[in-house]
Amino acid sequence: MDKLTEARRVFDIEIEALRKMRESLDDTFVHILDEIVACQGKVIVTGMGKPGHVGTKIAATLASLGTSSFFLHPAEAMHGDLGMVTSKDLVIAISYSGESEEIIKILPNIKMIGAKIIGITGNADSTLAVNSDIVQVFPKFNEACYLGLAPTSSTTVELCYGDALAVVASGIYGFKDADFGMFHPAGALGKKLILRVEDLMTTGEKNAVLPADATLKDVILELSKKGLGIVSIVDEEGCLLGVITDGDLRGQLLKGVDIYSLSVDDIMSKHPFTIRNNRLAVEALNVLKKRNISYMPVLDADRRVVGTIRMKDIVNVGIVG
């Protein structure tokens, strides 16, 4: 056996199955999609065995792209989980044979509850097809396993079909990247889309801020105490006048200057890079990278210093630009 040849054979068979499904798409897909978009309850996906695993992924994809959805295990449904189903729900039942025992047994109860049933199957004459309100029948294609029995091509097609429903529905909703971020707060992409500078900046007593009349000794103590590497110098209104960084002090020392003979005004950078508190954290990261700096003051709409944002604070939560 040539292992790579056999692996490519599996790819070829499954790609051909996908091609056949793509070409067979018609108004049935549109009808099912319209039902999903119009659903006033939940879109519930159910399936047994390998289609069940695929169904779990389809439900998760629907949910992540704006369709309220969950997976219902058909065996558990027969032992009380049917209580999750209401008359406003839409049930998508997946069975390539259309005769999965666990699926067939719950169909009458779903009908009694009043939920609409969408059947996805490869058998137009199956029990699932006959008892569905709308049925998507897959075209004939070969499974990729040698026996032609193990769900391979069929589950690939089911998965892609579910992705198509979820993605097209999200487009109809006008689903935006901010919506995606709202549903994925723990992921790097979600954090990039929703976390703002004010969520990550150092504020209050932990922030390093001094008035314009502070001495250089005050600056050194503030840098040492707060450990931010930067001190913001502000006027009586709390508005930014400039900053002094630990690098500024090192530069003066390397010059051999008696830093205690200098005033804060002599050392501070009067036009530092800053960012507003309501900007996305990823924007702050991009500024820091572009300017090759590690931190900068955060200002509100009135240019008052409200915090300090550091590159490491942004990177540590998983945002990498």
Image (spheres, helix red, strand yellow):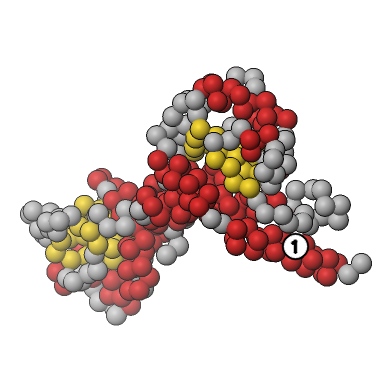
Note whether 144 is above or below 182 in the view shown: below
Residue at 77% over, 56% down: 142
SS at mark 1?
A: helix
Residue at 18% over, 71% down: 271
Residue 273 makes an appearance in the image: yes
Residue at 20% over, 57% down: 299
Q: Quadrant of the C terminus?
A: bottom left
Apparent side of residue 216 relative to residue 293 in the rendered image (left or right): left
Q: Nearer the viewer, residue 298 or 318?
A: 318
Residue at 48% over, 47% down: 31
Apparent side of residue 14 relative to residue 196 in the rendered image (left or right): right
Residue, far top: 80
Q: Nearer the viewer, residue 218 or 19?
A: 19
Q: Residue 18 appears in which quarter of the rendering?
A: bottom right
Q: How many numbered discs sit on the rendered protein?
A: 1
Note whether 293 is above or below 24 in the view shown: below
* Residue 149 locus on image (x, y percent): 82, 48
Note whether 254 is above or below 101 in the view shown: below
Residue, far left: 236
From the image, tell me which residue sits under label 1. 13
Apparent side of residue 106 relative to residue 287 in the rendered image (left or right): right
Q: Quadrant of the N terminus?
A: bottom right
Residue 52 makes an appearance in the image: no
Q: Residue 314 appears in which quarter of the rendering?
A: bottom left
Q: Nearer the viewer, residue 21 or 10?
A: 21
Label 1: how many residues lie within 10 Å, few (<14), some (14-19) or many (20+)? some
* Residue 99 locus on image (x, y percent): 72, 35
What amino acid type should be assigned to the residue bearing mark 1? Ile
* Residue 120 locus on image (x, y percent): 62, 43
